[in-house]
Amino acid sequence: MGVIKFTQKDLDKNRPFEAGWRPITITGNTERLSKKKDSMNHIIQLDVDIDGEIRDFEHTFSEKAIGMMEPFISAMLGKPAEVGVDYDLDAFTGLTGFAEFTKEIYKDASNPNDRGRPVNKIIGWANKDNPPF
């Protein structure tokens, strides 16, 4: 018989939280080759405060649509991102702010038997000094 051992992140994937704005702390970032191996993805790691419980979360930005990262950078800096400026993602580690999460059903389009599972996704970013709520 095999032995199974879960991490907290494994268990959290099956417990999506309610949609809304949540406090976050950036804990790091990595780069990964995309599934198609034709571009790089920038993965932002963060801690999310879910009513006092801290959960690890990752958000992916594709270099193919790097403009989608502008709201994140602007929110973390507290000012608009500028054209032509090099932003070092390592400098964002330790910064705090807010992220707006959805709670939606993810369905694998390539699997006709997939009934879907609830997931959380980030749809908005806000500076800690200027929350939108």
Image (cartoon, rainbow, N blue to C red):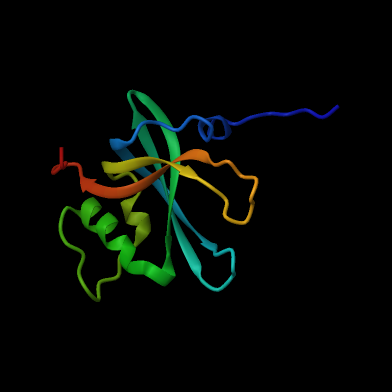
Residue 33, image x, y percentages: 56, 65
- Quarter of the picture containing the N terminus is top right
In the picture, which quadrant includes the C terminus?
top left
For the point 22% across and 57% down, which residue is it? 74
* Quarter of the figure with residue 26: top left
Q: Residue 2 location, x and y as percent? A: 82, 29
Vertical placement of residue 13 versus 63, above or below? above
From the viewer's perspective, tell me whether residue 42 is left or right of residue 22.
right
Figure check: 28 above or below 120: below
| Foreground residue among 54 and 109 | 109
The reply, left or right, for residue 112 in relation to residue 65 is right
Residue at the spot 22% in from the left edge and 47% down from the top edge: 126
| Number of residue marks | 0
Give the vertical position of 77 relative to 67 (above or below).
Answer: above
At 32% from the left and 55% from the top, the residue drawn is 91
Residues 29 and 123: in front is 123
